[in-house]
Image (cartoon, coloured by chain):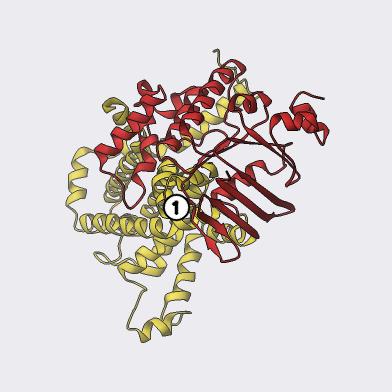
Chain colours: A yellow, B red
Amino acid sequence: MARPIRRSPLSGLGALFGVTLVGLLVLPFVALAISTPVGDLSAGAAHPLFVPALLLSLRTTLMSLIVILVLGTPLAWWLASSHSRAARVTEVLVDLPIVIPPAVVGVALLQTFGRQGLLGPTLDAAGISVPFTESAVVLAQVVVSAPFFVQAAANAFRKIEPDMLLVARTLGAAPPMAFLRVAVPIALPGLLVGASLAWARALGEFGATLLFAGNMPGRTQTMPLAIFSALESDVRLAVVFSLVLAAVGVVLLLALRFAPALRRTIGRITA
Amino acid sequence: MIVWRADVQAQLGGFELDVSVQGDAQPLAVIGPNGSGKTTLLRAIAGAVPVTHAHVAIGKTVLESTEPGIHVPIERRRVGYVPQGYGLFPHLTVLENVEFGLSTGPDRPPAETRRTRALEMLIELDCKPLANRHVDRLSGGEQQRIALARALVLEPDLLLLDEPLAALDATRRRAVRHFLAERLQTFGRPSIIVTHDVRDVVALNANIVVLEKGHVVQQGSLASLRQAPVNDFIAEFIGAG
């Protein structure tokens, strides 16, 4: 069957605008890549700030991703399946950190978990101190990146026909089993997109982390903060750090995005 | 002999369902205009609709009774359900779809037995060549057969079919109707079929219950409805109008 031709009324101008935007998005990364001699890469990797910051970034973003998946998946399911006013209000609340600047989120987290904050005295009494620790890094990442996952996951769950879950139930599956064996696999591509977006946002988190967790090498200095510190002393080092962070981001993002397609292909080949 | 009965009252937004139906092993066709509550009735019997008052029983097993407060969860009702559009799981192959129900209960058989039983059901329904296909690559008629196979492999006590032929074109519909009639006869247990086509009723030799605005307006055999249709919808449905 012939494909219908989609001709935009803005085809010439639209293409120019599109190419301009793609250029703006890609050009900085091309500049980053070509401005780094190979020798600088090994020197950057050997710098004392590099390995601790990279490991801290990977460790904390993995932790925050786990927290987001565990807490966010049931929430996204509820948002997708409930028609209540409470669900709509919650949806708006969940989106708040997307529209609020990260620096504001950092201050708000201090006002919540700081010694003088809302929960400060209670946490203090329990002997728990959150600000300027690795937990604070994770908490800042969770707050700024969770909305990306919850939003994408809720959209993915909305595409599941309710009848499929009812059928699964009539086939003997209790609600948790129907959710895990039918809803989650069907929504998996959307869940992975949400997880990759949230993870990427957590990896790049800077403002809230700086204000709430500080910039202490080996303790709370993540890669974006290490880039910030390196920039003050050695621009070439900052470029190397940036390149590595960009590469890590691209690799993990591609792995997450293409995992379902790869799995399907392998499944079809082996079937 | 009465094998099953369903007295259901439910309030869903502005819609009220108040229906009492019963039957034996012979199929029961539920007909009625759009929005008359046919699908809601099936879902209420399956246990998926909150009821205000109900008594649903198959044989001596009570599935729902508001008086003593009995509510058997959907997964333990042994009621098969084939929705409009069939509800096949798109992430699974045909064989995995049919196997699904055999792998859910606490007494699930070993994997090898599950596979054998699912394959036997596919062979019985002439669908074995489809076993390893993904469901999104099946025709409407094939999907209908697989959905039926998936429900029948569990040998449910009652089978609910919501417009099982609606998604098929006219040619396929005739063939699948014949197939469905044959299967339900072999199945030999009660079934409730929502339909808009009198030819389904004839092929299945079904009794009829007519719903309108959530209430039963007439029930009986096709012959009895033909003799005295109570409204224009029924007259038109049976071709007597």
Q: Position of residue B80 (x, y in %)?
A: 49, 41
Q: Is residue B52 left or right of residue A271?
A: right
Residue A233, by quadrant, is bottom left
Classed neighbour count for the residue bearing mark 1: other residues with Cα under 10 Å, few (<14), some (14–19), many (≥20): some
**Residue drawn at the location 27% of the way across and 59% of the way down:** A56
Q: Quadrant of the C terminus of chain A?
A: top left
Q: Which of these two is toward me, B223 or A119?
A: B223
Q: Quadrant of the N terminus of chain A?
A: top right
Does the image show residue A159? no
The amino acid pointed to by label 1 is Arg
Q: For numbered disc 1, what is the local secondary structure? A: helix
- Look at the picture and state if B168 lies above or below A29: above
Q: Which of these two is toward me, B235 or B42?
A: B235
Q: Position of residue A76 (x, y in %)?
A: 49, 54
**Residue drawn at the location 33% of the way across and 79% of the way down:** A128
Q: Position of residue A228 (x, y in %)?
A: 35, 57
- Look at the picture and state if A134 lies above or below B5: below
Q: Residue at label 1?
A: B76
Does the image show residue B78? yes
Residue most toward the bottom? Answer: A125
Q: Position of residue A130 (x, y in %)?
A: 36, 74
The chain holding disc 1 is B
**Residue drawn at the location 47% of the way across and 60% of the way down:** A102
- Look at the picture and state if B158 lies above or below B54: above
